[in-house]
Structure formats: C-alpha cells, structure tokens
Image (tube, helix red, strand yellow):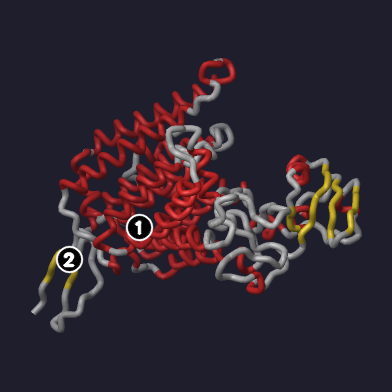
C-alpha cells in the first residue's frame, strides 16, 4: 500500500509499493509564501546595489519597481517587472557589469523563463507556487556554480603567495577598521587559507540537506563580515547573496516565518526600509555641503542594521521551527527543463578565462588569477586549454588620451589588444610584439581590424594584468 512521510518542502514525499521514492510535491501555499519572502529581500538587494553606486538618477524606473516589490512582495507582476528592468540595466552597462549584478541578471532570467513558460501553459492562472518551484532550483544550482568558481579560480600560485595574495591584502586593509588585529605572517596565511576554506565549505554545506541551515548561517555571517572591509562596498554582493540563501530554506520554515510576521508588519518593514533608503540617499546627496558626514556611507550603516536584524530574526525562526531539510531532489530538480540555461550560463561564464575569453565578470573577483599571454598561474589549468586568441595578443600601453588607458600605462600593466579596439578614436602609444607605435587615432594603425562586433563588445571584457612575474591583487 501507499505510505507518506514529510519531505521537508511542506508537502509529502509519496512512496511506491516497492518503496521507491517519487519526486516530492511542494505544498502550494507554503511555496507561494516562500516566494513572497524571497521577493521582499530581492527587492531590498536591488536597492542596495543601486545605493552602492549612487545610481538613483540613472535607474529611476528600477528604483520604483524595487520599492513596489518591497511594498507588494506578494505580486508576481511586481517581481517580473523588477526582473525585466534589472536585465535591461545589466545589458545596458555590459560588459562593465559587476559579478553580483550579472548573477542577479541570470537569476532574474530564470524567474522570467518560469513565468513565461507557465503563462504559456496556463495563460490565465500563473500560480506563484509554480513560479517558485520552477525558478528556485535553477538559482540554487547557479549559486553552487558561482561558489565553485570563486574557489577554483583561487587555486593559483599567486593567491597562496602572501606578498601579493588578495587574502593577505584584504586582511591588511581590514586593519583600518579593526586595528586591534595582529599583522604577522601567520595571520596573513590564516586569512588566505581561511577565506578559501570557508568559501569551499559553504556550497558543500548548502547542498547537503542535513547541513543546509549551518551553511546558510555560516555564509550569511561570512559575507556580512566581508562588508566591513573598506576595499569596496561589498554590501551590494552580500545583499544579493542573503536573498539567494533564503532559496535553500524549506518553504515550510519561510511560510511559518511569514505567518508569524504577518502581512501588515511586512508592509511596515517595507515602508521603514524604503524610508531608510530615502533618508540615506538624501544624506549622500547633501554630503558635499555637510563636511561632518563627507566620509560617511549611510548605506553601509543601513546595511549593517538590515543584515544583523535579518540574521537574528532568521536564526530565531529556525530555532523555534522544526527544521526538516529539503531532499536533494527538492533542492536541485528542475521541473521546467529550459531553466537549465541559468546554471549552464553560470558555468560557461566561469570557464571563460580558461577558454581564452573574458577575464572580467567571470566569477574571478579578487582571485589573483592570470591566464593571459600564454601563461597561466593556475595550479591545475595550463594556458594551452585556451581555444581563443584574445588573451594572447598583449600590449603595453605607454600613453593615451583615454583616462582608463593612461591609468593602465601609469601602472605598467599589460592589456589585450581587444580592449584598445574598443576605443578607435583615442590617441595612444603602445608596445606590441616588442615594437612601440604611436597613433593620433588608434584607427590609424594599419593593423587595426575595426571595432569588435556589438555582441563581442557586450560579452567580452579583459582586465589589465601585472607587468611583473606576480599577479597582484585586483578585482
């Protein structure tokens, strides 16, 4: 006869007569509530991104859409509008797109694919539970892929060299805000191995049902700690990750949390958060006239309050609720096959440096990775794996009318010639193939092959690399 037991997704895992488990069935109400909570924090992550670059004027429509999502996270339309506008902004600024904004675009593409596919199947009734069940596994898989490459890219000789490693550099800059920490070779190596160790542990914990909760708490704490570092405004990345981590929480837990909060208090939280962003934006705008706050980032303060409150509330809810983990099938099974494009795109993006393609926005942030110029510092992947030649044609810029190229020249860095082709009208002098050449316009170079096609300009971006034997720490 048929028996049933809890499956950890709020539904039942049905058993056949032979005892073989069938695919889990998610409780529709709980899945819909899980999407509501995710949407709330997804809208907040969008605003933290805009805040980190002070793009309120350039992204007005996205700001309004994110605020609407904060105030109406129960709306599938509001979520879809944010997804469309975010993807539009991502394409608009490409290829100069931050890693977290690219990952956000991939996740939003998954949400839209789910909505469109479901709308085609049932035009008048797109269930929120179905949107969650279809899009969440794709985003989870993509996040695991992201973490894989965050670790894999760091498996290079220079990341483990404390003289140039981003691990030791980050630890040294951390002393600006935590001067009581010791600075010794031992602490620098601890920072190097500790960072890569935690980043390797997080996806493993997230993927194993019994350790998912530990993985969420470790990841949230680790990424919130990273935002303290003054190197960059990392809270934009962390805000996106915080929302993504909630996708690993069983819908039953999120539904219980939402029921305890209540829709009225969730609306008040959205209003409070929206107001806080507004006040913070006013402070930033007024900073030039108010010398006392000139060096203050109010969004960083807002982020710290937001993240601490969120982690504490989530930990309390997880402690009071019986945590029945989702099965591996519940975590990663894709009910709509086309959504496999999301993790596959994340995978191809991470492989790009080793294929000779782009090196920026390839999940290789602060990894010390070098694959250019027929030379790889990776411990496992040689330069011979490259099937495209973009990274082999390196030039040393010695001067330019272009501000970015002049900065590259001042630092003595090398850059693929592809990045010069992006700027055909600038004056430039550079060394290519051992010969220095000067042109009033790059397009006057007899070897200039014209601007790259639009698609290549949008997809490919190459970082400048160190002119010395070691790859120094850079984004």
> Which residue occupies the foreground of this view, 376 or 120?
376
> Which residue occupies the foreground of this view, 89 or 213?
213
Foreground disc of the pair 1, 2 = 2
Q: Which residue is mark 1?
A: 131
Residue 26: % across, % down: 24, 62
Left or right of 383, for residue 392 = right
Q: Residues within 10 Å of mark 2 (few under 14, many from 20)?
A: some
> Which residue occupies the foreground of this view, 469 or 87?
469
Can you say which quadrant of the picture contains the N terminus? Answer: bottom left
Left or right of 403, for residue 48 = left
Q: Does residue 366 sit above or below 156 in this rendering?
A: above
Residue 465: % across, % down: 69, 54
Left or right of 5, for residue 192 = right
Q: Which residue is mark 2?
A: 12
Query: Would you identify the image quadrant in which residue 277 lies?
Result: top left
Residue that appears at 54% across and 33% down: 56
Query: Would you identify the image quadrant in which residue 278 lies?
Result: top left
Residue that appears at 25% across and 72% down: 23
| First reached walking from the N terminus: tag 1 or tag 2 | 2
Q: Residue most toward the left?
A: 1
Residue 111: % across, % down: 42, 56
Residue that appears at 49% across and 44% down: 184
What kind of element bears circle 2? strand
């Amino acid at each position: 006869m048929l028996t049933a037991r809890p499956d950890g997704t709020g539904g039942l895992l049905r058993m056949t007569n032979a005892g073989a488990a069938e695919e889990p069935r998610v409780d529709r109400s709980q899945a819909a509530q899980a999407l509501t909570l995710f949407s709330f924090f997804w809208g907040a992550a969008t605003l933290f991104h805009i805040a980190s670059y002070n793009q309120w004027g350039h992204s007005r429509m996205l700001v309004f859409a994110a605020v609407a999502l904060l105030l109406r996270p129960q709306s599938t339309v509001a979520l879809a509008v944010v997804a469309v506008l975010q993807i539009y902004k991502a394409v608009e600024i490409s290829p100069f797109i931050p890693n977290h904004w690219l990952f956000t675009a991939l996740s939003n593409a998954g949400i839209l694919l789910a909505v469109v596919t479901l709308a085609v199947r049932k035009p008048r009734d797109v269930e929120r539970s179905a949107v969650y069940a279809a899009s969440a596994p794709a985003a989870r898989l993509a996040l695991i892929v992201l973490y894989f490459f965050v670790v894999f890219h760091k498996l290079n000789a220079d990341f483990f060299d404390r003289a140039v490693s981003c691990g030791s550099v980050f630890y040294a800059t951390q002393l600006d805000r935590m001067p009581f920490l010791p600075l010794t070779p031992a602490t620098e190596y601890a920072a190097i191995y500790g960072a890569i160790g935690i980043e390797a542990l997080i996806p493993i914990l997230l993927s194993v049902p019994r350790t998912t909760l530990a993985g969420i708490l470790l990841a949230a704490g680790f990424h919130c700690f990273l935002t303290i570092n003054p190197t960059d405004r990392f809270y934009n990345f962390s805000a996106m990750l915080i929302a993504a981590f909630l996708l690993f929480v069983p819908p039953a837990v999120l539904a219980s949390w939402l029921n305890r909060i209540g829709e009225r208090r969730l609306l008040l939280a959205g209003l409070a958060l929206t107001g806080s962003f507004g006040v913070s934006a006013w402070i930033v705008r007024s900073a030039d006239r108010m010398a006392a706050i000139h060096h203050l980032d109010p969004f960083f303060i807002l982020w710290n309050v937001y993240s601490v409150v969120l982690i504490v509330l989530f930990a309390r809810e997880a402690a009071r609720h019986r945590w029945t983990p989702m099965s591996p099938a519940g975590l990663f099974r894709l009910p709509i096959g086309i959504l496999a494009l999301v993790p596959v795109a994340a995978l191809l993006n991470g492989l790009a440096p080793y294929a000779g393609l782009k090196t920026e926005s390839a999940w290789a942030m602060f990894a010390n990775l070098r694959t250019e110029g027929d030379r790889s510092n990776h411990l496992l992947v040689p330069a011979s794996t490259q099937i495209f030649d973009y990274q082999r044609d390196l030039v040393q810029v010695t001067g330019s009318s272009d501000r970015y190229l002049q900065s590259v020249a001042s630092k003595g860095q090398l850059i693929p010639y592809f990045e010069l082709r992006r700027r055909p009208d600038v004056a430039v002098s550079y060394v290519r193939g051992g010969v220095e050449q000067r042109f009033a316009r790059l397009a006057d170079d007899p070897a200039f092959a014209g601007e790259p096609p639009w698609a290549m300009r949008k997809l490919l971006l190459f970082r400048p690399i160190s002119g010395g034997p070691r790859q120094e720490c850079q984004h």
